[in-house]
Image (spheres, rainbow, N blue to C red):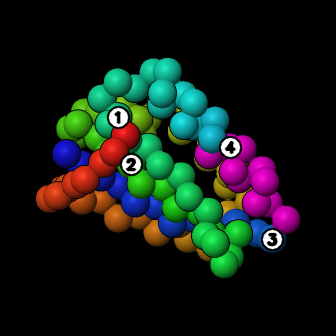
Amino acid sequence: MLTITAIIRVKQGCEAAMLEALLDVVSSVRANEPATIGYHVSQDATDPCVFTTYERYLDRPAMDRHNNSDAVVRFFGIAKPMIDGDVTLVTGTERSAKSSD
């Protein structure tokens, strides 16, 4: 299982638009990406300008299909002007998991 954790900071006032853009990606993942095992979006409890995604992929081709999907291209087209600084990406191999989904 491959994972990506992304930490995204947005400019103040862009929180609702970023959440909407991220939730659009989630909808696309649910409808079109059976090999994307999990796609979680969170918003920081103390700083609403910080969003985190935690993404779980069956394998490298699944990750590549997601990253090259129309939904991701559309997301970055919408999100790019809202992003404040660099997006932090951590790609890893999942070593342990517990899920109730």
From the top left corner, tell me how far across and down residue 45 is, in percent: 63, 72
Inspect the image, locate mark 3, and give the three-letter code of the amino acid beneath it.
Gln
From the top left corner, tell me how far across and down residue 85 is, in percent: 62, 73
Residue drawn where x is 57% and y is 30% of the image: 27
**Which circle's residue, 3 or 4, is located before the other in the chain?**
3
Are dots 3 and 1 in contact, CB under 8 Å?
Answer: no
**Which circle's residue, 1 or 4, is located before the other in the chain?**
4
**Which circle's residue, 2 or 3, is located before the other in the chain?**
3
Inspect the image, locate mark 2, and give the three-letter code of the amino acid beneath it.
Glu
Find disc 2 in the rendering and name its residue: 55
**Start and end of the magenta stretch?**
13-22
Image quadrant containing the C terminus: top left
Callout 2: helix, strand or loop? strand
Are dots 2 and 1 in contact, CB under 8 Å?
Answer: yes
Q: CA distance from mark 3 to mark 4?
A: 16 Å
Are dots 2 and 3 in contact, CB under 8 Å?
Answer: no
- Would residue 30 be counted in the magenta stretch? no
Q: CA distance from mark 2 to mark 4?
A: 16 Å
Q: In the rendered image, is residue 84 in sight? A: no
From the top left corner, tell me how far across and down residue 50 is, in percent: 63, 69
Find disc 4 in the rendering and name its residue: 21
Image quadrant containing the N terminus: top left
- Would residue 16 be counted in the magenta stretch? yes
Callout 4: helix, strand or loop? helix
Find disc 1 in the rendering and name its residue: 36
**Which circle's residue, 2 or 4, is located before the other in the chain?**
4
**Which circle's residue, 2 or 1, is located before the other in the chain?**
1
Residue 12's label in the rendered image is: 3
**Which circle's residue, 3 or 1, is located before the other in the chain?**
3
